[in-house]
Image (cartoon, helix red, strand yellow):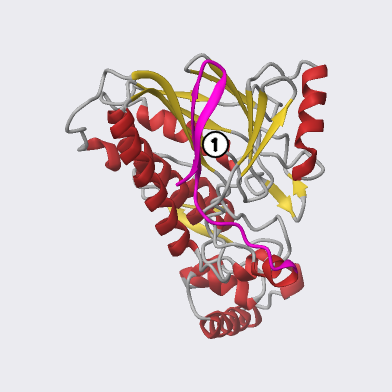
Amino acid sequence: MCNLCKELDPALSNRENARRLGVNESTVRRHKRKHDQFLVQNDIPENLVTSRGMSVRDPETGSWEKVTWKPNAKAVHDALQFDDLSPLLDNWSPSRYNDKGNPIGDVLNIADLQIGKAMEWGGGTKETLARATASVQAFAAQVERDKPQQVIIADNGDPIENCWNTSSQRATNDMDVPEQIRTFRRFMLETIKLLSPLVPELTYVAVPSNHGQARVGFQQDSSTVDADFGLEVSYQIEDAIGLSPFLSDRVQFARPQPLYTTAVADIANTRIAFNHGHLSRGQKDHANWWRGQDHGRLPGWDADILVVAHYHNMKLEQSGNGRWIISCASCDPGSSWFTAKTGEAALPGMTAFKVHDGQWKDLRLV
């Protein structure tokens, strides 16, 4: 049996197998026919085949061992390694460091990129990355001019499109899930490499989200909120950066406590709470949700500013006595169905703002 026949998943359609293996659908049909002939020739009823395996040769003894493995699971396993990040750091060093900063903080919110989302009026992943790169570069230029003491880059959630949030995603994505993960984490690492030399202190914040959630089926979470690809990417980047002599002491990481969804970071004498925002009943309900967190003294209850995403548009709202809610824009391709239905479309980009002594200033779309 050829290698492609061994990797065919009988639970998937010909089209799905073709996309997973990177071949034409006709190739899958041809190999399936060949495989069916193999079963007939060896008098093996198809309905009795419960799994397909392959022989693996031990390089030391030369002996062969029969193993059964899952190509899909291996693809995700490969995507969750950070070895591919090492070459991006091995031969890299900044041309200079800025170790002096003004007593302000600047925050860049990289929200709802949904890498892999495609077939929209705003294009697909290629166009998303172009917009995101332009936003990061514009933010970096302002950081270089203003020289803040601290910078936060926040993954506000939904970093990838995934394929289990809605039933249409598998047909409209332009990347499979492992490639979405690899693309997003490399983008974030390059963002760190660009910004870290410009400021004395850089903090990477990550929060769980609906598109980032690891799932076993449509709307079926595989585990707790901690089983999240966005959180996992932040751990991978932290592992990779820990091996870099240029970045290990300059980049800090903030994530929610286990089983919680809100991350908290202190910057320029200001406490900021980050939450994806999907737990509210709508964008107009964030204030009520935060009041409940405050009453329960849950993470972020005592923050000066709450930063949320999920709704792909920038919004500023006052809450209580001098406290603020900032909703974040997105660089994603948009949602054509929503615009066609409502006529509404948000300007793409990243939301950024400065903070000092508990208050924001210079709220902007970059």
Name the residue tied to disc 1: 232
Q: Residues within 10 Å of mark 1 (few under 14, many from 20)?
A: some
Front residue of 148/96: it is 148
Q: Residue 154, position in %: x, y?
A: 51, 35
Position of residue 172 relative to residue 108, above or below, is below
Instruction: From the top left corner, tell me how far across and down residue 157 is, in percent.
Output: 60, 42
The percent coordinates of residue 270 (x first, y second) are 54, 18
Residue 8 visible in the current orientation: yes
Q: Where is 75 relative to 335, above or below?
A: above
Instruction: Point out the residue furthest to the left here.
Output: 95
Q: Secondary structure at mark 1?
A: helix
In the image, taking residue 140 as reference, residue 354 lies left or right, namely right
Looking at the image, can residue 61 be seen?
no
Q: Name which quarter of the figure residue 105 lies in.
A: top left
Q: Amino acid at mark 1?
A: Glu
The image quadrant that residue 191 belongs to is: top left
> Is 224 rendered above or below residue 337?
above
Q: State yes or no: residue 201 in magenta.
A: no
Q: How many marks?
A: 1
Task: Give the side of residue 41 with respect to residue 196, left or right.
Answer: right
Give me the residue at 22% from left, 25% from top: 97
Is 345 included in the stretch rendered in magenta? yes
Residue sitting nearer the eye, 317 or 237: 317
Q: Which residue is drawn at the image coordinates 49% and 42% (left, top)?
A: 364
Q: Quadrant of residue 273?
A: top right
Where residue 151 appears, x then y in whole percent?
42, 27
- Give the residue drawn at x 71%, y 62%: 50
**Viewer-closest of 37 and 90:** 90
Residues drawn in magenta: 342-366
Residue 72 appears left or right of 310: left
